[in-house]
Image (cartoon, helix red, strand yellow):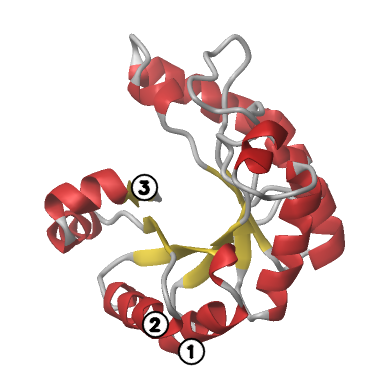
């Protein structure tokens, strides 16, 4: 899959998704919807019908009513996009959370939010690798975990506060990894992508309980 985030979607809109889907690529639509339930339901309904969309994100902090409205909006078909709740952004640490009035550690808050998302009917969450293991244990094997903030060893962390290597994320229970700047900002993007793929392959052992392809 390729991730379409707010930058590309703001610049090109649905036609970007249509062009990527036309190339045979699945779409991780990372727009992180966060609004009143009716507005989010309408937005989710609109993008769920776009070609190739397999994953859609929304902020869990929007509340249970908003998440349930989104879940209803995507329908019940087997080929519907999966809904992922964003827990705590990987750019935030404990100090940043406190600054905006959120108590507790990122790990404790992410776990609480993941359980809330599961109860509201979402298919999974976006969370850092540091929280993935606890979320996997609490929410079970069928709950999707998408891990951003992936940085190979010796790579720059950029503006991320909670990062992990591909191997760490997989061993902690991730289903999908989001890899952006380690490839796009590399002097040789192809070599960087291949190195990350090798690390993923070495971590995803055949007998691993996390080695699944949802």
Dot 2 falls on a residue whose secondary structure is helix
- Identify residue for label 2: 41
Secondary structure of the residue carrying tag 1 is helix
Disc 3 + disc 1, Cβ < 8 Å: no
Residue 192 seen in this snapshot: yes
Expressed as whole percent of the image width and height from the top left, the position of residue 92 reads 60, 36
Q: Position of residue 198 (x, y in %)?
A: 58, 25
Of mark 3 and mark 1, the one earlier in the sequence is: 3
Which mark lies nearer to you, 2 or 1?
Answer: 2
- Categorize mark 2 by other alpha carbons within 10 Å: few (<14), some (14-19), many (20+): many
- Ranked by sequence position, the earlier of labels 2 and 1 is 2
Looking at the picture, how far across and down is residue 187, in whole percent? 33, 9
- Whole-percent x, y for residue 118 in the image: 70, 73
- Residue 57 or 64: which is nearer the viewer? 64
Residue in the image at 71% along x and 63% along y: 114
Disc ID at residue 72:
1
Q: Residue at x 18, y 59 (%)?
A: 22
Question: For this view, does 83 lie left or right of residue 114?
Answer: left
For the residues labelled 2 and 1, say whether their Cβ atoms are less than 8 Å apart: yes
Please tell me how crowded label 3 is: few (under 14), some (14-19), or many (20+) other residues with Cα within 10 Å: some
Q: On residue 2, which mark appears? A: 3
């Amino acid at each position: 899959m390729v991730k379409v985030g707010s930058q590309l979607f703001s610049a090109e809109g649905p036609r970007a998704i249509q062009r990527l889907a036309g190339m045979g690529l699945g779409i991780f639509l990372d727009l992180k919807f966060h609004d009143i339930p009716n507005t989010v339901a309408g937005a989710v309904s609109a993008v769920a019908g776009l070609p190739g969309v397999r994953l859609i994100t929304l902020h869990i902090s929007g509340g249970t009513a908003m998440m349930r409205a989104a879940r209803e909006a995507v329908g019940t078909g087997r080929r519907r996009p999966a809904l992922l709740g964003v827990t705590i952004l990987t750019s935030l640490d404990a100090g940043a959370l406190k600054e905006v009035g959120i108590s507790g550690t990122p790990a404790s808050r992410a776990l609480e939010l993941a359980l809330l998302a599961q109860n509201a009917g979402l298919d999974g969450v976006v969370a850092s690798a540091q929280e993935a293991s606890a979320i996997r244990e609490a929410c079970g094997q069928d709950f999707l975990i998408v891990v951003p903030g992936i940085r190979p060893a010796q790579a720059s962390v950029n503006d991320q506060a909670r990062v992990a290597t591909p191997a760490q994320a997989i061993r902690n229970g991730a289903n999908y990894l989001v890899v952006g700047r380690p490839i796009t900002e590399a002097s040789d993007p192809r070599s960087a992508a291949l190195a990350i793929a090798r690390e993923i392959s070495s971590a995803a052992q055949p007998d691993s309980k996390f080695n699944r392809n949802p």
